Image: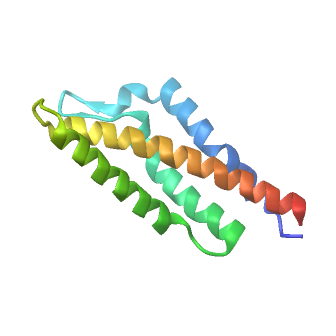
Amino acid sequence: MQNFHYFEILLYVFPILEIILINKFFRPYLRYKQIIQLTVADVVLPFLFVGIHLLSVYSLTYSLLPHFLLAACVVGLLQTLYFDKRKKIHRPKRFYRYFIKILFLMALLFYYLLVLLRIYFLVRG
């Protein structure tokens, strides 16, 4: 049976807690005048990257983060092609917003797939 660390419980619930805490208490601090306006996805994404790395190392003994980043680059290229084929004016700010949203959803799904994989490995032994 693989070793279980109590730190892992924090890893399992941390992204959801972070999203709730940021939405509830820190939402007004995510903007600076009209210059910088961050979303919750912008803040949570780096923590998801670290969590993907830690969970994949705990589960598989190697990091899946480079594979995830490669998939994110492919999604960015596909999104660039989509925006290029559209007849509307291309705005980089809009591209980055959509890219961050897609990347956040991909990272959250991948993160919780790794959580399920880790729980499966712990139960299976």
Classify residue 117 by image quadrant.
bottom right
In the rendered structure, the answer to whether residue 19 lies left or right of residue 80 reads: right
Classify residue 31 by image quadrant.
top left
Residue drawn at point x = 36 percent, y = 57 percent: 74
Most foreground residue, 94 or 3: 94
Residue drawn at point x = 20 percent, y = 38 percent: 93
Image location (x, y in percent) of residue 105: 49, 41
User: How many numbered marks have been drawn onto this rendered protein structure?
Assistant: 0
Q: Relative to residue 22, is residue 78 depicted above or below?
A: below
Quadrant, the N terminus: bottom right
Residue drawn at point x = 64 percent, y = 70 percent: 57
User: Coloring scheme of the render?
Assistant: rainbow
Image location (x, y in percent) of residue 54: 61, 64
Quadrant, the C terminus: bottom right
In the rendered structure, the answer to whether residue 73 lies left or right of residue 120 reads: left
Most foreground residue, 78 or 44: 78
Image location (x, y in percent) of residue 24: 52, 24
Residue drawn at point x = 79 percent, y = 55 percent: 119
In the rendered structure, the answer to whether residue 114 lies left or right of residue 79 reads: right
The extreme bottom residue here reads: 61
The extreme left residue here reads: 89
Image location (x, y in percent) of residue 80: 23, 47
In the rendered structure, the answer to whether residue 109 lies left or right of residue 95 reads: right
Most foreground residue, 39 or 26: 39
